[in-house]
Image (tube, rainbow, N blue to C red):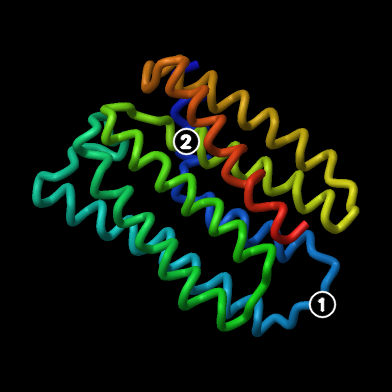
Amino acid sequence: MKVFSNIISYLLHPLFIPIGGTVAYFLITPKYTPLEVQSASILPIFILTVIIPIITFLILKNIGLVHSISLETIKERKYPLYIHASILLLILFKVIPNNYVSELYFYFTGLLGAAIACILLLLFNFKTSLHTVGISGLLMYLINLSIHFEINLILAISVFIIFTGSMITARLYLKAHTAIELFIGLFIGLLSQLLTVRFWL
């Protein structure tokens, strides 16, 4: 069970949620999108949300500001979350406007809102489950896309419901979070995408 919990925690790491939603959009959308436009969105988002955070994590670890990828303490979480929020702002202002897609713009707006909520909770010494925030946000985004494009995504949605449940179970098993931290993470993830959907649905 411990091996399974670690595998699911790494495979569904919040680091992969922004690029996961971007790729999901281009796979699902019935709109014609040239490969050049897809590449112009996917590649910079991948570099900004996966490569750069990995590099900055290594730098932060090297200078002693973080000690493990788990970011176990509230103090360790501050800097990665600040960087994450800054990167999302950069994507919203510099990457997406070049090839504007409303569905992606408000997806990243929701991700930014979730990141800000997690930062605000840190001020109250509350450690939200970032894994749960990420996976539940992506789940709600898939539901929104299914309704928006009137496409049956029941299989993908079912899989992500299982992923979300598995993630909650894994984080509890590993004692990485308490039940309330996981519940708040689930709530933030779902609500952040639910609040933005009214602008593009």
Residue 3, visible in the rendered structure: no
- Give coordinates of residue 132: x percent, y percent: 51, 33
Say left or right for 108 vs 34. Answer: left
Residue marked by disc 1? 32
Looking at this view, is 146 or 191 the one in front?
Answer: 191
In the rendered image of this protein, does residue 66 appear above or below residue 28?
above
Label 2, residues with CA under 10 Å away: few <14, some 14-19, many ≥20: many
* Residue located 50% across and 69% down the image: 92
Quarter of the figure with the C terminus: bottom right
* Residue located 65% across and 84% down the image: 36
In the rendered image of this protein, does residue 136 appear above or below residue 65?
above
From mark 1 to mark 2, how far is it between C-alphas?
A: 32 Å
* Residue located 72% across and 53% down the image: 198
Say left or right for 11 vs 118. Answer: right
Q: What is the quadrant of residue 127 in the picture?
A: top left
Looking at this view, is 108 or 172 the one in front?
Answer: 108
Task: Give amino acid for label 2.
Answer: His
* Residue located 35% across and 61% down the image: 86
Q: Which residue is at the far left?
A: 63
Label 1, residues with CA under 10 Å away: few <14, some 14-19, many ≥20: few
Task: Give amino acid for label 1.
Answer: Tyr
In the rendered image of this protein, does residue 37 appear above or below residue 129?
below
Disc 2 secondary structure class: helix
Q: What is the quadrant of residue 136 in the picture?
A: top right
Disc 1 secondary structure class: loop
Looking at this view, is 27 or 109 the one in front?
Answer: 109
Q: Which mark identifies residue 131?
A: 2
- Give coordinates of residue 104: x percent, y percent: 63, 64
- Give coordinates of residue 177: x percent, y percent: 39, 21
